[in-house]
Amino acid sequence: MSNKPMFVPGRHGADLQRARQVAAPVRRFIQGPAEPSPAQWQAIGESLMQGDAAMDALLDWMSETGLAKAMPLYNRALEQGIAAIDEAPQPLQRFFAQVEATPDWLDAELLDEGARVCCLSGLTGMRVLRDLGLLAGYQASAINRTLVLTGALEKGAQRRIAETSKWWIDCTRPGGMARGAAGYRGTLHVRLVHALVRRRVSSMPEWDASYFGLPVNQGDMHATYLAFSVIFLIGQRLLGVPLSKDERRAVLHLWRYIAWLMGVDERWLHAEENAAICALYHNLLSQAPADASSQQLGRALIDEPLQRHYPNLQWLRGRLNRAIHLSIARTFIDAQGRRALGLPGGILPWYPLLTAPPRYLLQRLVLCLPGGRQWLSERGDRQQQAYLLTLFGEDHPRLLVAMPVASADPQGH
């Protein structure tokens, strides 16, 4: 076998100086050496050319068979398992044999514990994912390119956030990732759509593979998984949600499995927190700098709170939430990044400064009480469900997809 390095697209480390500035907030949380080795750096670059071989092969069969015929079989296997389909086609059997053969490291109890910890974060968790993940992630222009070419820019920020929040909540409820459960089904639907997008966009004449690599590649899926886990945990610290080492480990375990099910290769999955933070830092160094699409997406997201379906005080609550989100983003995005994203000037980090200390003290106090942790988890679940209703309004929550973005970008199609 040849050890010759694979081709690395031009976007990889296109502006290291700026990338280091963007990644600086993550770097502060790393214990020990932070910089990638030459081998690690090469592997990240090569990952931008790698897709999801198992799902891509299944999509080949689905396309040959016809989606109208293949999709009902796929959906039935999602809900009931491949054994429920008599004489299932071999390509479908091969794919689900791999998916249903859960990895040796999987711990079902730890999955549910990770889900309970995600509930503990309540509304704070949703805000972290939106502001420190999605908005900050729009600085990664190479990933934005997929959104531009699929027309997702026209879809609207509010709907994309609603759909991805629905998927996130389905995945992060106890039992949500059990075979056939809502989070399990949603994740494998996302994986299929990623393959569809990968095939569609890579065939477009506007897609420059020499610079962008492969659409929805391993590197970008890796970044998204780390954003949902690492950025989520960092954000809890910044906003005063106290989480123990064991609780953080449970969240990492949950998202490690979700990413595995999503088609992220085993080599990019992390069991230990510091290793995961390092991996996110390395990935951010690889990302291309902001461009015009960053401002397009950023400005749309700024005004998203004004479009929500509040039960009352629409004008006031919309503007208050807009100010809260901008204030949270201010803690994680530097001045150059804020300009690149089209954020207004003069933003102050008032919300984290005013709310993190009392939130920390209150949660610490409640955790000392009998049943306190369960009360916080149940309260957090109610807050997240209410947030979902505010995003969707009277529409029944429907999952479409979450496209991968550096730093947790829930981008729907």
Image (cartoon, helix red, strand yellow):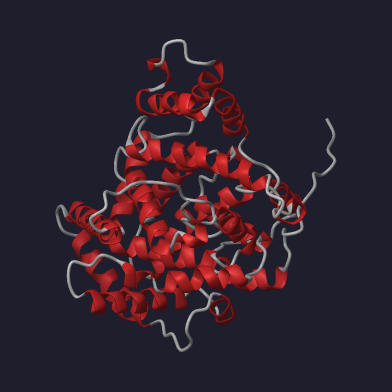
| Side (left or right) of 26 relative to 285 | left
The residue sitting at the top extreme is 87
| Side (left or right) of 5 relative to 347 | right
**Which x, y percent locates residue 296?**
54, 71
| Image: 106 above or below 333 | above
Between 201 and 328, the one nearer to me in the picture: 201
**Which x, y percent locates residue 371?**
15, 52
- The reply to whether residue 101 is in sight is no
| Image: 31 above or below 171 | below
Between 370 and 392, the one nearer to me in the picture: 392
**Which x, y percent locates residue 131?**
43, 68
Between 327 and 69, the one nearer to me in the picture: 69
**Which x, y percent locates residue 230?**
48, 57
| Side (left or right) of 45 relative to 352 | right
Q: Residue at x 57, y 31 (%)?
A: 59
| Image: 388 above or below 239 | above
Q: Residue at x 75, y 49 (%)?
A: 39
The residue sitting at the bottom extreme is 346
Which image quarter: residue 380? bottom left
| Side (left or right) of 384 relative to 371 | right
- The reply to whether residue 210 is in sight is yes
Q: Residue at x 48, y 87 (%)?
A: 345
Quadrant where the N terminus is found in the figure: top right
Q: How many marks?
A: 0
Which image quarter: residue 253? top left
